[in-house]
Structures are given as C-alpha cells and as structure tokens.
Image (spheres, coloured by chain):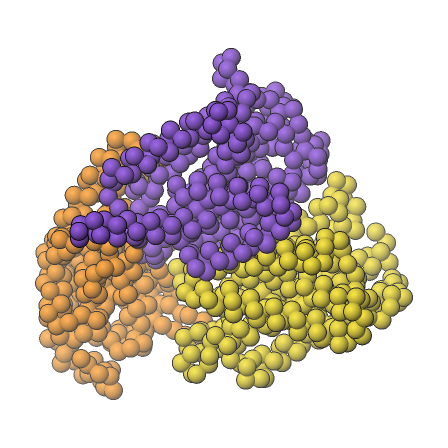
Chain colours: A purple, B orange, C yellow
Amino acid sequence: MLRRAKGKWTYFLVAALLLFSILIPFDWFLGRYTSLVILIGISTMVTVGLCLLMGYTGQVSLGQAAFYGTGAYISAILSKTYGVNPWLAMLIAAAATGAFAYVIGYPTFRLRGNYLAMATLGLGVIMWILFRQLSQYTGGPDGMAGIPYLSVGGFTFNTPFRRYFLVWFFCLLVLLVSQNIVRSRVGRALRAIHGSEAAAESIGVNVTQFKVKIFVLSAVYASLAGSLFAHHLRHVSPQSFDFLASVKLVVMAVIGGLASVWGAVFGAATTRILSDELLLRFGELDVIVYGLILMLVMVFMPEGLFVKLKDVVAHWRLRYEQRGTKS
Amino acid sequence: MSQSVLEARNLGKTFGGLVALDKLDLAIETGKITAIIGPNGAGKTTLFNLIAGVYTPSTGEIRFEGMPVNRISAHGRAAMGIARSFQNVLLFGNMTVLENVMAGQHPRSSSGFLEGALSLPKAHREEETVSLKATKYLNLVGLGIYAQQEALSLPLGQQKLLGIARALATEPRVLLLDEPGAGLSTIEKRALGDLIHRVSEMGISVLLVEHDMPLVMGIAQWVIVLDSGKKIAEGTAAQIQKDQRVIAAYLGEDID
Amino acid sequence: MSADQFVQYLVSGVTQGSVYALVALGFTIIYAVTKIINFAQGEFVMLGGMLSFTLAHSAGISLVPALILSVLGTAAIGAVLYLLAIRTARKASVVSLIIITIGAAIFIRGIAAQLWGVEAVRPPFFTGDEPLPFLGALIRPQALWIIGTSLVATAVLHSFLSYTMMGKALKASAISHVAAAMVGIDTRLTSLAAFVIAAALGGLGGAVMSPLTLTSYNVGVMLGLKGFVAASIGGFKSPLASVVGGITLGIVESLAVGVDWGPFTSAYKDAIAIILLLLILLLRSGTLAAEERAG
C-alpha cells in the first residue's frame, strides 16, 4: 500500500471535483443526469457501510437491501399513512433498522465461521416477502405512492435540483463521518481486527462488539439512504429491494474497494451507470456481467477495483516524477 | 513471600479425549521473571492460552491478583493488565510500526464511535497522548527509528520486538511471552534478555514459555517445569538444571 | 387436518426434504474439505434439472443416459468453477471466496436465463405420473424416485468416504490440510473432488426433482438457502445431520403450509427456513464455549 503525501495535486483535484459536483444539476451542464446522480449518491451511502463491514469485519452482507428497504418503507408508511413529520420518520426508521441489525448481528457475529452471508441473504428474502405480503401497510407487490417530499421550514425539496444538494449533503456527511471513524482510535481497532483478530483481542479489543457496531452502522446508513430514496421517487415497491438489489450493492462495494471509504463513490457511480446502460441494451444480461465482475475483481484484485486503480495511478506518478528528476 | 500475581488451582484442560493439562497448581510471584519449560507436548502452550484467556479451563480456576478470571474474555484480561505476545508475532500488517504500538494503547484510552465520528477535541487530545506513549514504548525496545515504516517491512527479530512493544503499550502488570526467542540469532536473544530485564525492573511480572535453555537459564528467576500436562518440578534455574526428574523428562529431547 | 391429509403432507415434506438433503450434503462436503461456503450450490440443482430437460425432452435422449449426462454435466461445471474461480484465487480471504462463489452463482443464473429463458420447464417423468396408494394417501411415482435416489446417493457417498482411498483422503483433508499434505495427499485434488461431488449431488437432486416440481433459472437461491439451513443443523460437519436436517425442514415447511394458520399463507413458506436459520444462530450463539470463538 503506497502512502502518498498530501501534495498540491490532491488539493487541486479535490477543489476541481467539488466545483464539478456543484455544477452538475444545472441544466446547461449535466442537468439531465441529475436524477441518476441523486441515485448514485443514495447508493453511495449504502455502499460505504457495506465497504466498512466487508473490509473490517471480514464478513459479507447479502441482504443490505433489507435495511435499505426497511428505511424506505418505514419513512413512506409513517409520513404518508400516518402523517408523521418526514424527518422524524427518517430518524425513527434509522433507529428501528439499527436495532433490527443489532438483534440479527449479535448472535451471528459471536459464531465462528461465516454465517452472516447466509443470514443476511435470508433476511433480505424475509423482508422482501414482508414488503409484498403486508399489503395493508406496504401496498403489496405494487408498492405505495404519494409519499410526501421532505421540507425544511417553507422550503420543499420538490425538484431534482434541490434534492440533488440534499442527497449529496447527507452523502458527504456519511462519507466524512466514516472517514473520521476510520482515522480514529475506533478505526485503529477496526484495522487491528482486519489485521489479526487474535492479536486484536490480546490488546483489549472486543472483536465481536466492534463487528456488531459496524454492522449496525451499515444498517443505519442504508436506512437513511432508503428514506431519502422514498422521498425522492415518492414511490416505493418491493422490486427495488430484492436479492438482486443486494447483489448490486455488493458489486458496488467490490468495485469501490472493501475497507475503502471514498472508493464507495466510485463503486456506486460505476455500477449505477453500468447497470442503466446494460439494462437499456441487453435486458437480462446485466446479471451475467455482475457475476463476472464479482469473480474477476475478487480473483485478481481482492482489495477492490478502485484501490487497485489508485495504486496504479500512484505507481505511474512515481515513475513520472523520477523521469523528471533524471533529466 | 510476595503475593502471587497469577495463581492456578486445580487447573485442567481437555480437548476431546486428550488431557492437555492435568489438575495443575501453580503460583507466579509478583515482580519476578518466571519461565515455563518442558518437552514438546508438555502443555506449556495450553497453559499459556488458558492464562491469556484464549481457552476456558475444563477444571479449576485462574486468579489474577487474587481475582478469579475464568469468566473473563481475552480482551477483558488485556484491559485488566494481562498482556501477551504471540509465537508467530501476529502484527497488524496494515499499519506502520508506530501504529501497531499505538493500537496497544487501546485499553488505556476511551474515545468511541461518537468521539471518533465527530472528530471531537477529546479524541484528538487522546491521540496525542497515545502517540507519545507509544513512541516511548517503541524506544524502549529500540525500534524508535522505524516508527513510520510498514510493520511487515521489519525483519523477524525486530517484528518480535515490535510485538512485545505492542503488548507493553497496554500497560500491563503481567507480560506473557510466547516463545520470544524462537527464530532469533544469538545477538538478538541477548538483546531480548536485556529487554526482559528492563521490563522486569519497570515492575511488570514476566512469564515466558520458552524452549531455548541458555536464554531461560540466563534470565529466569524462577522456573516451572511441565511434562505431559503436569508440573514435575519448580525452582531457581540452578536447581532445575540439576533436577533428576527434569533431566529424565528431557531425555530423548534435544536441549539446545 | 385429517389423518389422510397429514400423511399426504408428510410425504410431500419428505420428498422436498430429500432434495434439501442433497443440497445440504453438497454444502457440507465442500465446507468440510475446503472451508468454503459454496453459494453456487443451489445453482447445481437448477442446472441438473435444466440439463435433463434439454437432454430428455428437447433432444429426445432416453431417460437413463439423459440422467447420467445431466449429472456428469453438472459435475463438470462444478469442476470448472473450482479450477477457474477458486483455485486461481489462491490465498484469497474468506470474504473474497464468498463473493467469488456468489458471483459464480449469479453468473450461472444469468447464463441459464439466456439459454433456457425465464419460463419454468419440466423434464419427463421417470415412470409416468400415475399416483400410487400409500397409507391412505396417494404418492406420485416421481416422489418415490426422489426419496429413493437421495437415500441411495447418501449411502453411496457414505461408502465412498469410508471405504475408498479417495474418500479417506477427502476425510483427511477435512480434518487438516497440513496433515493431509504431510501424508502425501494432494489437497488441491481433494478440493476439486469435493466440488465435483457436491455438484454431482446437486445435479442429481435437480434432475430427479424437476419432473415433479418444475425448474427454472431462479430456483437456485432458495434451494441453496434451504440446503444451507439443513447443513447448519449438522454444523457443516456431519453428513447424516445434514440429511436429517433437510428432511426435517421439508416436513416442517409442508405441514406449516398444510395447517390452516390464518394469516400464514403459502407465501410465507420460504420464510420458515430463514426463521429456522436465525433460530439456529441464536441457539448456537448462546451455548457457545469460549474456544470456538478463539480457536
């Protein structure tokens, strides 16, 4: 892993990206892609949690869509059917989903071996069944529509332009919080777990507890994303939260890099764009491509595509600089 | 007679049909350097792992400074003051040398998810302290200049020292060393011996499991000998070397 | 529920459970020998059914050769999966391996959807579909085939593991790769064998089940999940427990749907296996000794 010092290059790049991002929703720039970029932002929030989970606990969640869907449906039901303030509904959804993840995670992480994958796969299926079957609350297989917009004071997020900034505000929040966590004492404990669980225990790290906490965090992120999703499309249906949705999230995390925070943006963006393009042209073939991506990336670059790309870029930068000093 | 920092009473461990340790009674004196030796299969590693909290006893109990610790997990024991090193070091390969030692400060610091997530001043202050203390321990084992290097870039001998520095960073009262001399050159073993003396002078009780006789005899103030899961002798290094039972147990074994 | 109905549900439960048992055996054997959870296990069942449909129905090949070819074909795919995806990954972490097998699973699913479409297909019955009387209920001959095949397959597997050199090598690898290597066992070969056997078992299950239950490109996920649950009951170590687990799950599912519980409709049938899994996790977690965690 190459360590790059923060040079002028990095600040320039960040500033350029920031400017670029702010200009996207303008019609004269990339305005027609606003909805896509909103969805990328929402997916990123879920992906970050998944990256942290897979990267630091060494376990895979195949049912992250369950938490995503729970957040969406609770927000939808509370705000539409019961007239609850959407922000409060979002908070309730996050708390409920987090508690849910705790109940599932605690017994699962205490066991050796890899039970989380199947447990979450099963969880995803159960939630999907519930979303379809509890039709008096969820609207059944057709889902529910008419979900209100989010608003602050008199200002309603009723245009893609406004929602773009709302979603990316939350997304950046999630990214920054995750970055902070990774750099903190907690992050060091997580990296210790990733390095050697036995050694982590020997320095006082309660490995199981940390794993559960990361799982809960990933569920909370997913729930927030789901709520934003509900208030963006104003319509939720079970199709968005099936097994394939969970698989797509894993693809995003794999491309972005396990244990990578900012890579999640790359992973979410690539996968979203890929899936929309593929779906457009090839119909059912997208599943084949996802399968291939998962296998190829994991076999040849297990740290994730983005991380590998970063290393390649750093390598070329080093050679470029060396060539410069030679002449 | 000073109080025992570690005590085992009727301690036993069975794996399936195999009795690894058989109703062991022993006491480790505070502030001393104690060595546990014995031929292969004697149960030294099992005893080590029982004290460290990796295994649960099948019979008997372990007490740390008078307190029973059977129910306390490995990470709990680290917080209580029992630190350990690993035979195959088990460094955190994704961190630098200094970060490995800073990780050892985990039980002596307290910033959690909230403080970390919000990047609170308290968390930053704590990081400063942790970093300073870690540097101190790193210098203690003589690896100060390598602080920013990748942990796995060090040669084995220095990796072992790093592992000990990490364990020391937990500010333990007992340090358990699992075959610290394995794979080290003669010079490195001498440096290890010196380090163990310095650790002992800091007031930390040291318990080591070791195969290397010269190393053990050179630094151990008390030696306990195990064979086939039982304690067959204990005494000073000089006494043990002359003990008939010990010599008999090692017959057929290469004493290096 | 009358006695006749009860027997009917019992029979259908044992039938379905036999398929779960075969899937569970596949999981167990791969996990025991390679420590990998093979998420593509359910897809092997799907492939067995699909291949036998193409061979027996579309190509008009007679029953026994079609069956054999389907099983061999699935076994070959299992070998390819191991050689191309697993072996090339070498020292991959557990996470990587799980994701690889998941990738393989959805890849196979996707290809199947392209080759066979999304409609369900049904290969021909082995010996027709005239229901036979049995303890007051009627049993379809294919169900007997399913139960019988599973029993025979389990027995053959057991003999193989206990009495042949390869079988013993597999058992040795299951205990320790290092130890096995030290006595001259090629652990890469035993791992390959594990995948081939698991795929063959799955394919057999699929071929024998699909005349009765139909099959389509997406049956793999739930079958895999249920087989996993059955294997969990045996802790992934005991083939016998896997079989018992599979049959039990089948019976529980069948009876739960049969008994009229009000809001509990057949849509929730799939949820039973999952709830069972979560219960197993909870129970195991609670009675766990410290060394399992620390190892």
In screen coordinates, is C79 left or right of C256? left
| Residue drawn at x 14%, y 56% as measured from the top left | B143
Is residue C143 visible in this depiction of the protein? no
Asked if residue A307 lies left or right of residue A88, the reply is left
Q: Which quarter of the picture shows residue C217? A: bottom right
- Give the position of the N terminus of chain B as an image quadrant: bottom left
**Rendered residue at 59%/57% (across/down):** C107
Compared to residue B141, the image places residue A126 above or below, namely above
Instruction: Give the image location of residue A195, x and y in percent.
Output: 34, 55
What is the x, y in percent for residue A1? 30, 53
Observer-nearest of A293 and C263: A293
Q: Is residue B139 visible?
A: yes
Q: Is residue C166 left or right of residue B189?
A: right
Counting from the top left corner in percent of width and height, residue B83 is at 25, 55
**In front here: B15 or A112?**
A112
Q: Nearer the viewer, residue A65 or B253?
A: A65
Residue furthest to the bottom in view is: B252
At 77% from the left edge and 59% from the top edge, which residue is drawn? C121
**Count of picture labels:** 0
